[in-house]
Amino acid sequence: MKVSSESVGRCRGPKAVHVLCSNSLVLLKDALTSAVNSLTAAHVGSPRMNGELLLMFTLSCDRAHLFAHPERELTVEEQARYEEALIRRAGGVPAQYITGHQEFWGMDFIVSPAVLIPRPETEHIIETVLHLNQETHTVGRASSPGPTHIVDVGTGSGCIAIALAKEFPQAIIHATDISPAALEVAHANAARHQLENRIHFYQTDLLQGFDPGMFDFVVSNPPYVGESEQDQVQLEVRKFEPRNAVFAGPTGLEVIERLIPQAQAALKPGGWLVIEMSGTIVEAVKPLLNQWNHLQITNDLQGIPRVAAAQKP
């Protein structure tokens, strides 16, 4: 829900989120209590966490400040900014799109509605690449001498490519996305982490335009939700996150089915494909990789199959 600046400080009817509605100073602790109550009434999950996160965003402070200064007075301007953020959150806008930030792999990333919000389960991709790289070099099966070449397909915010650039300081990193708006966000994130000279970004569909046998790793968090599963996806994801980054098509396999043969061509012999997926499609993904070696499925912390890795013969 978009709220105009004219209405931010105005009292609202019973269906609206009413937080402060005051022209006087309000204590931090009272503003937070009111926010938690309002978010609870609006059926927002984790209302206290959301209330604290948006208050930290409003005041440009950390959580320790909230606990250390409960008697701090909010100015009328701060009240108005906080209320606007809470109204947007109650309307379903993800907190990350309100604050413009999300943490991933211990780093802070800029996010916007142009990109999928990075999620903790995607960190399993980084963990898998680290494990496979160590294992490959330990047993002397590296696909080629020299620096490791990695491409992140459908980079979005750039979180996977940037995390890998951090973990592999000698690697040559490439990242693709079909969306120019997403690539702008990824470029900005690379610059924030002083990695803009380490990562090469390309606007293309999956791996189109790359020469055969270029990469040691092809990694991707592709769209993998089927349109038939829409009702099982959180409303705020369906409504606010980029649809083409969430839904692959009727079955959820459509992008992965195109990516696998392109990855096979782009990888060096012995190179690895590492992709995120869901438990819904894992049994359908396995046959697509039956010509590959050493297929591995990694579960996330909830025990759901989350990452598939396979080695090119």
Image (cartoon, grey):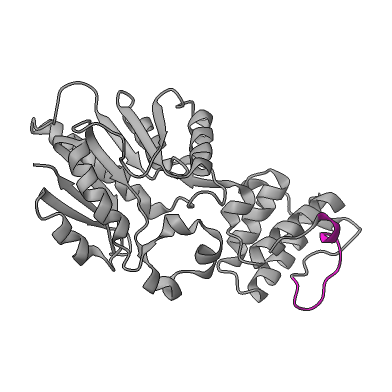
- Identify the residue at horizontal 18%, vertical 32% (top origin): 213
Q: Indicate the position of residue 47 as horizontal and vertical percent values.
A: 61, 66
- Identify the residue at horizontal 26%, vertical 29% (top origin): 149
Q: Indicate the position of residue 119 as horizontal and vertical percent values.
A: 43, 53
- Identify the residue at horizontal 63%, vertical 45% (top origin): 62
Q: Nearer the viewer, residue 264 or 129?
A: 264
Say if residue 300 shows up in the picture: no
Q: Nearer the viewer, residue 67 or 116?
A: 116
Magenta: main secondary structure equals loop
Q: Nearer the viewer, residue 227 or 146?
A: 227
Say if residue 90 shows up in the picture: yes
User: Relative to 197, is 138 above or below?
Assistant: below
**Quadrant of the image occupied by residue 138:** top left
Q: Which residues are magenta?
A: 5-16
Q: Indicate the position of residue 94 as horizontal and vertical percent values.
A: 58, 59
User: Relative to 232, is 66 above or below?
Assistant: above
Q: Indicate the position of residue 278 as horizontal and vertical percent values.
A: 31, 62
Residue located farthest toward the bottom when viewing the structure as drawn: 14
Look at the image and tell me in which quarter the C terminus lies. top left
Residue located farthest toward the front when viewing the structure as drawn: 209
Is 134 on the left or on the right of 4, as rendered?
left
- Identify the residue at horizontal 72%, vertical 46% (top origin): 59
User: Relative to 5, is 157 above or below?
Assistant: above
Look at the image and tell me in which quarter the N terminus lies. bottom right
**Quadrant of the image occupied by residue 301:** bottom left
Q: Is residue 79 magenta?
A: no
